């Protein structure tokens, strides 16, 4: 199945209550598939094309406030428009799933794949001291699995979750195993606004606290939650790290291209491994720090001008050199280029 | 076994669906597959291409710069991908509309007059199936029966009556492909 279509089908099967979206290349197949599939007959899931990206994220905010499994998807320029809404949802501590099928920027940029939204996804994007849980699929299979996982984490922590995909994973086709249909939620959460009950206080969903003392309490609560997320939810994969003298760090589609470079390097006798973060927040800093005791140098490979490399450097904390290789603007690095960069910047450097 | 294929031509020649059929057929044969289209500005007019990978092992990069096989269906695609064939690899080109022959001497080269053949069959839509037939003749990476199963999967049921026609086109392609340069 095509990455975007598989993700859309996964949304239905994960028991989502609602999808609100607006078309943009390279993620339009998500909303196209959902519109064609019309899941309201299958599961009762509502699908709506909103009048804009901003409207879509605010519809998600509303549905999430009622304790529903709601999601939206877009690509980079559209995600920028959603940032205000995302900050509000994070501030109001509501669960939702947002998918960014990243294209190159800044501005309208181009429709080709990129990873240039790493900072936006991981470091904030919207205003205020908040975090998204960020999942980075590298295969169509992971795009599917992370929809279910994303909803689980969103509700476990009452926090927005982002799937940070890109044009390659969205547009490519490969084999995929779909999970069984999950039931839609049948829970009345106490934090959800479902109408005031006579014997209970009214529930107010808000991200507004005019008293600084109250706002600080919210911030402290959020930070405590983020520490929990960091403790429990780090996910990553390593390849060929057992005997590695050098290390690649890469995520998403770029990790697959880098893995090809790793295979080519090993065929030439270069002992190089690959660490692929599956969660970008929380970041697998401890794992990278541990590997830094073993390897002589780390090359971070990204389809941007160097964003995750900052987190890799923080994790390594100066133990070994951390260098960067990237292509951007929708250009995709080739395995040969990556191998050459390893040889020049790390082995020869 | 890993076979990395680039298929390139004009939009409308069935380039993307050829890749899909090869991949679905690969799935039917129990292989790992990956299909990556060009979906950029080129898709909005002009040349289109897709990368199809079939392998016994998990596929790492879906995006490649070097290929075991290149199938080029117009001159711009030949210009772009002739040099991207690995030494010892295979280049198949459609004769119609080419202004020059391939220059490489370190690869296997085949030509196929698929367009002319499709005109003879009174159905230019089967053009791409003729090309697939040609590929299967010189590089039988997938069994024909699995290609038919793949077609059943790709085509909506209302088009299933066209499968025999497609099968005929594959056989035609197997017959007419011409080996121009074969390495020892």
Image (spheres, coloured by chain):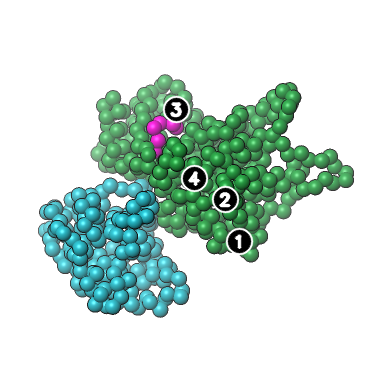
Chain colours: A green, B cyan
User: Considering only order in the chain, which callout, 3 or 4, is on the residue closer to the N terminus?
Assistant: 4
Cα separation, mark 1 vs mark 3, equals: 42 Å
Q: Position of residue A185 (x, y in %)?
A: 69, 53
Discs 1 and 2 lie in a common subunit: yes
Inspect the magenta stretch and tell me whether residue A183 lies in it: no
- The residue to which callout 4 is attached is A75
- Chain identity of mark 4: A
Q: Position of residue A318 (x, y in %)?
A: 42, 21
Residue A141 seen anywhere in this rendered image of the structure: no
User: Considering only order in the chain, which callout, 2 or 3, is on the residue closer to the N terminus?
Assistant: 2
For the point 27% across and 35% down, which residue is it? A340
- The residue to which callout 1 is attached is A39
Give the label, 3 or 2, closer to the camera.
2
Cα separation, mark 1 vs mark 2, equals: 15 Å
- Chain identity of mark 1: A
Give the label, 1 or 2, closer to the camera.
2
Q: Position of residue A144 (x, y in %)?
A: 52, 52
Q: Secondary structure at mark 1?
A: loop
């Amino acid at each position: 199945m095509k990455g975007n279509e598989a993700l859309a089908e996964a949304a239905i099967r994960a028991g989502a209550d609602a999808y609100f979206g607006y078309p943009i290349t390279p993620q339009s197949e998500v909303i196209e598939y959902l519109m064609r599939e019309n899941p309201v007959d299958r599961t009762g899931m509502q699908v709506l094309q909103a009048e804009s990206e901003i409207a879509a994220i605010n519809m998600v905010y509303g549905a999430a406030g009622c304790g529903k499994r709601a999601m939206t998807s877009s690509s980079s320029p559209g995600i920028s428009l959603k940032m205000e809404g995302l900050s509000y949802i994070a501030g109001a501590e509501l669960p939702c799933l947002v998918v960014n099928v990243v294209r190159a920027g800044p501005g309208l940029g181009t429709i080709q794949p990129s990873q240039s939204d790493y900072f936006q996804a991981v470091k904030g994007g919207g205003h205020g001291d908040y975090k998204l849980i960020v999942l980075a699929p590298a295969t169509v299979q992971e795009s599917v699995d992370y929809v279910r996982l994303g909803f689980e984490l969103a509700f476990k922590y009452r926090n927005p979750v982002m799937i940070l995909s890109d044009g390659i994973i969205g547009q490519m086709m490969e084999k995929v195993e779909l999970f069984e249909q999950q039931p839609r939620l049948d829970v009345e959460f106490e934090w959800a606004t479902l109408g005031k009950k006579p014997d209970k206080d009214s529930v107010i969903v808000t991200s507004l606290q005019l008293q600084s003392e109250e706002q600080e309490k919210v911030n402290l609560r959020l930070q405590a939650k983020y520490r929990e997320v960091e403790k429990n939810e780090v996910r990553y994969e390593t390849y060929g790290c057992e005997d590695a003298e050098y290390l690649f760090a890469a995520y998403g589609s770029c990790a697959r291209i880098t893995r090809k470079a790793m295979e080519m390097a090993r065929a030439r006798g270069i002992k190089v491994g690959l660490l692929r973060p599956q969660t970008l927040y929380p970041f697998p800093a401890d794992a990278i720090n541990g590997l830094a005791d073993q390897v002589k140098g780390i090359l971070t490979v990204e389809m941007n001008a160097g964003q995750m490399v900052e987190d890799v450097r923080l994790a390594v904390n100066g133990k070994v050199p951390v260098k960067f290789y990237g292509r951007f603007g929708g250009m995709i690095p080739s395995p040969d280029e990556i191998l050459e960069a390893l040889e020049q910047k790390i082995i020869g450097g | 076994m890993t076979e990395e294929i680039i298929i390139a031509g004009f939009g409308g020649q069935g380039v993307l669906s050829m890749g899909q059929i090869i991949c679905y057929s690969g799935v039917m044969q129990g292989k790992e597959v990956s299909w990556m289209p060009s979906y950029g500005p080129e898709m909005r007019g002009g040349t289109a291409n897709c990368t199809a990978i079939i392998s016994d092992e998990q596929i790492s990069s879906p995006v490649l710069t070097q290929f075991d096989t290149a199938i080029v269906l117009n001159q711009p695609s030949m210009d772009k991908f002739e040099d991207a064939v690995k030494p010892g690899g295979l280049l198949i080109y459609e004769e119609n509309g080419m202004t020059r022959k391939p220059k490489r001497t370190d690869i296997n080269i085949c030509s196929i007059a698929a367009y002319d053949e499709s005109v003879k069959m009174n159905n230019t839509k089967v053009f791409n199936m003729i090309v697939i037939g040609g590929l299967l003749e010189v590089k039988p990476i997938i069994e024909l029966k699995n290609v038919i199963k793949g077609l059943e999967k790709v085509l909506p049921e209302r088009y299933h009556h066209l499968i025999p026609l497609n099968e005929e086109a594959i056989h035609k392609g197997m017959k007419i492909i011409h080996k121009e340069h074969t390495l020892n």
